[in-house]
Image: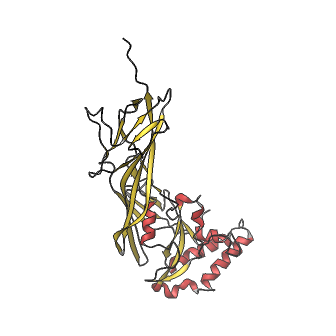
């Protein structure tokens, strides 16, 4: 059985104060509604008579939109993109969803009495209480803002922090509520959907190297370039968008053992002026020190070392009313690859 997510949460507490209320789910799935993927475009929405979910659209380099293997960014520091936010819903839509969910709960013999009572109390707020008839008489003057949860983060406690009951916002006003959808919030949501290439560095020697011999490392500039995702919301008179751009700025090498040296000593290789990282090995450079690389000091024996390569991406955004790039926290994404290190065989004469 499916009921409107924000009303379902409201009925958890008969007093409507002990649980996050007014939360819908940015659901992803197939069939009617859900997330539509392909060609780098996703639309999160769902209408089935009982739900009205996020109608933010995403386009660009999106996780899960196809193509080669990809990964998502991990923000540097303790910041994370919103796991929930508030979106507009017209008065007509809000009435329809609230009444449908009310009928579903109160007419269900399996629902406990406290849930039915709470559902009725919630309905009364907007029908005959603080508001009258869902503000239908003011339908052209504003929208209801209701909370939406990111479907991919329902296990995250932050998904339940948008605990405000649905609230009315007049056209042109900016809600004074954290995570009410704005261009900046759209940019933060886009951040969470940016797809970046898998971080596998090219090595010379490749896969198998020798003790005390430098291994050169570099990245293909054709693969590691700027990527971006645009988030847009055009509904009920609100038309805003934001584009979040990720640009690679450095590569960090972690050899997977303390018995190794990195080039440079910090293990952090900066992006070159031509947007490449490191320098491709060429014949005749065997005696040179690589600008980006590693040197293992001990054999890996019968196993391998786990070389981890992590790229740091600089994140900026532009959007409606914000034409100049603004910073978001840097993001990182990395992978490990197996490296076999062998002893140099001596020749006995």
In this image, 273 relative to 75: left or right?
Answer: left
| Vertical position of residue 340 compared to residue 59: above or below | above
Q: Can you give x and y, in whole percent of width and height, for residue 327 in the image?
A: 40, 65
| Mark count | 0
User: Is 164 or 285 nearer to us in this picture?
Assistant: 285
Q: Nearer the viewer, residue 1 or 243?
A: 243
Task: Using the image, determine if residue 29 lies above or below residue 243.
Answer: above
What residue is rendered at 38% in x and 66% in y?
Answer: 317
Q: Is residue 226 above or below residue 268?
A: below
Q: Is residue 131 visible?
A: yes
Query: Which residue lies at the image location 36% right of the left edge and 54% below the top edge?
Result: 249
Image colouring:
secondary structure
- Of residues 75 and 114, the one nearer the viewer is 75
- Evaluate whether residue 4 shows in this view: no
x and y percentages locating residue 337 in the rendered image: 44, 38
Residue 273 at x, y percent in the picture: 27, 52
Say if 33 sits above or below 266 in the image: below
Displayed quadrant of residue 23: bottom right
Residue at the extreme top: 349
Q: Quadrant of residue 230?
A: bottom left
Name of the residue lying farthest toward the right: 113
Residue at the spot 62% in from the left edge and 70% down from the top edge: 20
């Amino acid at each position: 059985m499916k009921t409107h997510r924000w009303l379902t949460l409201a009925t958890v507490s008969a007093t409507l104060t002990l649980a996050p209320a007014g939360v819908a789910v940015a659901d992803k799935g197939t069939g009617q509604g859900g997330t539509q993927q392909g060609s780098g475009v996703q639309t999160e929405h769902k209408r089935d008579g009982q739900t009205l979910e996020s109608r933010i659209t995403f386009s660009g380099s999106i996780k899960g939109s196809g193509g080669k293997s990809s990964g998502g960014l991990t923000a540097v520091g303790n910041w994370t993109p919103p796991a929930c936010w508030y979106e507009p819903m017209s008065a007509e839509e809000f009435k329809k969803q609230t009444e449908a969910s009310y009928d579903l709960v109160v007419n269900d013999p399996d629902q406990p009495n406290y849930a039915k009572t709470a559902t009725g109390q919630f309905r009364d707020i907007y029908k005959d209480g603080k508001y009258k008839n869902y503000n239908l008489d003011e339908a052209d003057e504003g929208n209801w803002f209701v909370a939406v949860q990111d479907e991919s983060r329902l296990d995250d406690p932050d998904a339940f922090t948008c605990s405000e009951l649905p609230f009315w916002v007049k056209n042109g006003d900016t809600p004074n509520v954290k995570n009410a959808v704005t261009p900046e919030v759209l940019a933060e949501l886009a951040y969470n959907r940016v797809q970046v290439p898998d971080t596998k560095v090219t090595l010379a020697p490749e896969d198998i190297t020798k003790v005390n011999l430098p291994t050169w490392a570099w990245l293909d500039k054709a693969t590691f370039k700027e990527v971006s995702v645009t988030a847009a919301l055009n509904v009920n008179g609100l038309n805003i968008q934001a584009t979040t751009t990720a640009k690679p700025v450095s590569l960090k090498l972690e050899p997977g053992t303390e018995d190794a040296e990195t080039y440079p000593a910090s293990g952090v290789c900066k992006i070159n002026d031509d947007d490449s990282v490191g320098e491709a090995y060429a014949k005749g450079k065997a005696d040179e020190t690589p600008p980006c690389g590693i040197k293992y000091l001990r054999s890996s024996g019968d196993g391998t070392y786990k070389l981890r390569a992590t790229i740091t991406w600089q994140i900026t955004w532009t959007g409606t009313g914000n034409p100049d790039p603004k910073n978001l926290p840097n993001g990182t994404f990395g992978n490990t690859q197996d490296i076999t290190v062998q002893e140099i065989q001596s020749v006995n004469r």
